[in-house]
Image (cartoon, helix red, strand yellow):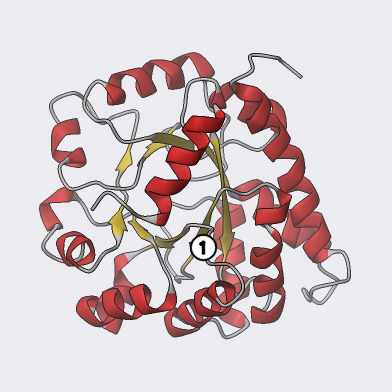
Amino acid sequence: MTDTRISRRFELLAREGRAAFVTFVMAGDPDPATSLAIIEALPAAGADIIEIGMPFSDPMADGPAIQASGLRALRAGMTLRGTLDLVRAVRAKDEATPIVLMGYYNPIYTFGPDAFVAAAREAGVDGLIVVDLPPEADDELCLPALAGGLNFIRLATPTTDDARLPKVLANTSGFVYYVSITGVTGTAAPNAVRVAGAVERIKRHTDLPVVVGFGVKSAEQAEIIGRDADGVVVGSALVEAVRTSLDAGGRATAETVGSVTSLAASIAAGVRRAKQGVLA
């Protein structure tokens, strides 16, 4: 599987000489309509690839900000089917932007893996990141997803050594997601020197783009990380922008969409400066 929206986007970015800006937002946060409006506005704010979280009640890899966003979405009635409907609505207006669903296996297992792959493909999903499925469980979802035309994006971490890395990369496609910190999302800042070394090491094992996430919150951090990585993921900062825009009852306000997109645009500018080597 080589010709996908994801591969085409990275080919375009390589020609332009810049890193990808990958945004993460939670499906249905703070409500389905506002969530859709945010996602639809992200490409114009500079997002090259959009990761959409599948809300789950026990998100073990997520820090407080993304956990809270998932709970807001669940309270607003978001489901896995609703997440696919959201993607379908985005696709009705945007055929170009790659969309990746990120989350946990339990809701997919309940849905039915084969049915989920078919439904995701039909809705316009391009790739999956399922953080709690190791390579040893590739038969569960990874291989069916690849057979169904979806990229399956694997996480590599600071503890993934050279003996383990080939196993992690064996069925990975689209890009490799390097988790820049040990721990959960959004709880620490990445060390740029360590990230650079890790990206270089992973690239010795694969030709896939290497995208770095977990802990990147500002344009300055994104610029530094983007000098060595093929892409930078920002999630916790964006879902925090949702939270801080809500009214006292936790409802969206007139500022909610703009709060997210203005922050995204600021970070996108940092990512775009990265390969130019100019520190803001």
- For this rendering, which residue is in front, 115 or 45? 45
Specify whether 105 is left or right of 96: left
Let me know if residue 231 appears in the view: no
Query: Residue 15 location, x and y as percent?
Result: 50, 31
Seen as rendered, the residue at the extreme right is: 254
The residue that label 1 is drawn on is 52
Query: Residue 249 location, x and y as percent?
Result: 81, 77
Amino acid at dot 1: Ile
| Secondary structure found at label 1 | strand
Specify whether 95 is left or right of 11: right
The structure residue drawn at horizontal position 13% and vertical position 58%, both measured from the top left corner, is 137
Query: Residue 252 location, x and y as percent?
Result: 79, 73
The structure residue drawn at horizontal position 30% and vertical position 72%, both measured from the top left corner, is 106
Let me know if residue 153 appears in the view: yes
Q: How many labels does the image show?
A: 1
Query: Residue 203 location, x and y as percent?
Result: 30, 24
> Toward which corner of the image does residue 270 lie, by quadrant?
top right
- For this rendering, which residue is in front, 115 or 19? 19
Q: Quick check: 277 above or below 263?
A: above
Q: Quick check: 203 above or below 82?
A: above
Question: Which quadrant would the C terminus be assigned to in this image?
Answer: top right
The structure residue drawn at horizontal position 19% and vertical position 32%, both measured from the top left corner, is 165
Specify whether 111 is left or right of 210: left
The structure residue drawn at horizontal position 42% and vertical position 47%, both measured from the top left corner, is 8
The local crowd at label 1, few if under 14, some if 14 to 19, many if 20 or more residues have their Cα within 10 Å, is: many
